[in-house]
Amino acid sequence: MSSDDEETGDGRMIAWPLERLARVMRAREHEDGLNPAQREALRYVARANRFSNTPGALTRYLGATKGTISQTVMALERKGLIAKAARDARKSVRLSLTDKGRETLDNDPWVQFEAAVEELGGKTRRRMQRGVEELLAREVKRGELESFGICASCRFFREKGRDGDAAGPHLCMLFEDSLSNEETGCICIAHEARA
Ligand code: SF4
């Protein structure tokens, strides 16, 4: 690595720590009688909006098979961490966290990692966020995957489009439905980045 690389950053010296970090975190995901897939599913259910909290969307998010997701959801249900409820007349299922599931999530390694990120300086955090988002977007595009972004960056989002509506104040043009402030921070299977 040249002295220039040391000043401007080197791809390897960012990729290697990220790889090691993922490995270290993956090892911690085996704590408390859970496995990494179960933890990923729990985090997904906590973050997904009401259009995305289904086993089908979870399958797309994790890039797993239907059978694997079905096993994961059943295991989480047995442990009392998630609950299933009928979603609509087509008998699809809506997943939600139970109180025990929310408590378990408080001790999740990646949720705790958020606090470590908060301890970094604001400038470092902003730069990291931009860089990681850009790298993730490229990989998502390369793999032709759903983006699972949030409303603020979605082409269907209209801020204050339902101002005055009790379920609002924002509008999703795709689902033609109101969105609360809280929902706009959730991830969505139908998210499409603005051009
Ligand atoms: S605005 Fe986009 S991200 Fe938000 S609910 Fe609608 S489709 Fe999903």
Image (cartoon, rainbow, N blue to C red):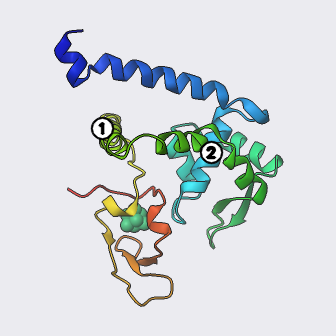
Secondary structure under tag 1 reads: helix
Q: Quadrant of the N terminus?
A: top left
Residue 123 in the image: x percent, y percent? 31, 44
Residue visible at 48% across and 45% down in the picture: 118
Quadrant in the picture for residue 69 = top right
Residue 77 at x, y = what percent?
A: 78, 50
Compared to residue 160, the image places residue 129 above or below, namely above
| C-alpha separation, residue under disc 2 versus residue under disc 1 | 25 Å
Judged left or right of residue 181, residue 110 is right
Q: Residues within 10 Å of mark 2 (few under 14, many from 20)?
A: many
Q: Mark 2 points at which residue?
A: 41
Residue 30: x %, y % from top left: 71, 29
Towards the viewer: 135 or 10 = 10
Report the quarter where the C terminus lies. bottom left
Tell me whether the residue at label 2 lies in contact with that at label 1, contact meaning CB atoms closer than 8 angstroms: no
Above or below residue 113? Residue 42 is below
Residue 120 in percent (x, y) is at 43, 40
The residue lying at 62 percent from left, 72 percent from top is: 88
Q: Residue 131 carries which label?
A: 1
Instruction: Give amino acid for label 2.
Output: Ala
Q: In which quarter of the image is ligand 1?
A: bottom left
- Give residue 145's mark: none
Query: Image point 78% across, 35% down: which residue?
Result: 32
In the displayed structure image, the side of residue 101 where residue 64 appears, left or right: left
Asked if one can make out residue 67 in the rendered structure from this viewpoint, the answer is: no
Give the camera-side residue of 184 and 16: 16
Q: What residue type is labelled 1?
A: Gly
Pick whichever of labels 2 and 1 is earlier in the sequence.
2
